[in-house]
Image: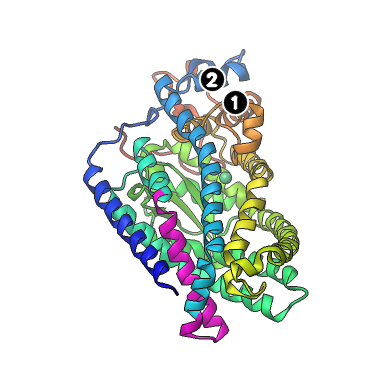
Amino acid sequence: MNRSFSRTVCFLLMSVCLGAGVLCAQQKAAPESTAMPTVIPVPLEAQPSAHFDVEAATRAYLNQIPPEAKKRSDAYFEGGYWLQLWDFLVGAGISLLLLNLRWSAGLRNWAERVTRFKPVHTFIYWAEYLVLTTLLGFPMTVYEGYIRERQYGLATQTFGPWLNDQFKGLLVGLVLGGILVVVLFGVVRRLRRTWWIWGAVVVVLFTVFQALIYPVYILPVFNKVTRLDDPRITGPILSMARANGIPAREVYQVDASRQSTRISANVSGFGRTLRITLNDNLLRRGSPEEIQAIMGHEMGHYVMGHVYSGISFFGVLMVIFFALLRWALDASLKRWGERWQIRGIGDTAVLPLVVLLGSIFFFVLTPIMNTQSRNTEYEADIFGLNASRQPDGEAQADIHLAEYRKMEPGPIEEWIFYDHPSGRTRIHSAMRWKAENLQLFTPPALKEGAPSGVESGPPAAGSAQPAPKAGPKP
Ligand SMILES: [Zn+2]
């Protein structure tokens, strides 16, 4: 490794530390809240009546969002469109820098000086590559993951703990990415003609492995996962799980509020690592009906085997990608290989080129991947409505999710950028379901003294006890 390269790395490290100091000094500014109303009552138009109108009920729910909050979350989400483009351009720029300044070849030479034993050499190259690209992309990461999140009131962390999480992420990436890169280069070096097929197989198997270990081994690196012991909450959820044939005996809680105000939940892992997890933001802010609607949706993913269809879809994309990669690598190395000092496709120095080609492929395919995801999310919504029978809980959840999602996009916008149906589509589906199941809901006129809140909904499917309150609400 030459001197000027080492000097550049030192300079980068210094500017990162300096930037961190400035941010620590600035972080006292309190974020403005973008929070949606905590209690979202069932609007008059969405209450059961002889003239229940799906469109009017949907619009009434959408109108519950204060105009200021809508403006902010629209701006946040639309800014995200541009960030996708900037992330792509910055990533591509970093790859081109590593290739054209022959830094990648330098990293390889450095790793070769330590050892020529291929797997260890590859791992050392990976460690160098990961640290250097993380440093180069750091200003963008700080803006996107810290400054912007705080500007919009979505982050709860100060800079120190945030940086600590970034560091942990780097270590996880070092280990997991290292395993993948070592195996992939091993495949390329041994199977000179068929590596592109086996490479796709390796990436797919690795993705399955990651999904398998995530809830039990990776999530706890960043957050505290505890068993949820409140039977008033777990009762209806586990009952809904049993009713839908999901072999879960426990519900877990994760302290997502450590990082963010976002609500979410999931059913993750497979087989022995399968688990239902709720985040504490949802537990604190969601009504029981909302929690049940969200859990119904998550259970839909599990029952309809979306993990498997997602992996199959990803597998097909991977085979196409690797076939194109093989062709593009050959063509680029023939043309620029000498200039970049890359010896061939089995040379670790080729990695930035692979990353560049991968980012182009997946950037172009963004709308296709979002559409695949959006379709399965829509299916899970419909499953969730049938399983939980909580259309108002669903609408309430959609309004809470609107803190960081634009509710009413245009059709092309939704097609390109949305990996979930838009809030409007989701509330509309819920109200459509409600319109066909009005008999399940006690007309408010018959329920004397009952507040016009979502509490008028029925208990979840298979739930023995009435839905309880989720917890203290301001
Ligand atoms: Zn989902």
The foreground one among 233 and 450 is 233
- Lateral position of residue 294 relative to residue 185, left or right: left
The foreground one among 458 and 86 is 86
Magenta stretch encompasses residue 136 = yes
- Residue that appears at 45% across and 49% down: 235
- Quarter location, residue 274: bottom right
- Quarter location, residue 357: bottom right
Q: Quadrant of the C terminus?
A: top left
Magenta stretch encompasses residue 58 = no
The foreground one among 432 and 354 is 354
CB of residue at label 1: within 8 Å of ligand 1? no
Q: Which residue is label 1 attached to?
A: 431
Colour scheme employed for the rendering of this structure:
rainbow
- Residue that appears at 42% across and 61% down: 169
Mark 1 touches mark 2? (CB < 8 Å): yes
- Secondary element at tag 2: helix
Numbered mark located on residue 46 in the image: 2
- Residue that appears at 55% across and 87% down: 117
Horizontal and vertical percent position of residue 279: 41, 48
Horizontal and vertical percent position of residue 16: 33, 56
- Residue that appears at 39% across and 71% down: 3
Q: Is residue 357 above or below residue 117?
A: above
Horizontal and vertical percent position of residue 50: 61, 14
Q: Main secondary structure of the magenta part?
A: helix
Numbered range of the magenta stretch: 112-139
Q: Amino acid at mark 2?
A: Ala
**From where the camera sits, is residue 224 visible?**
no
The foreground one among 392 and 146 is 146
Q: Quadrant of the N terminus?
A: bottom left
- Lateral position of residue 380 relative to residue 396, left or right: right
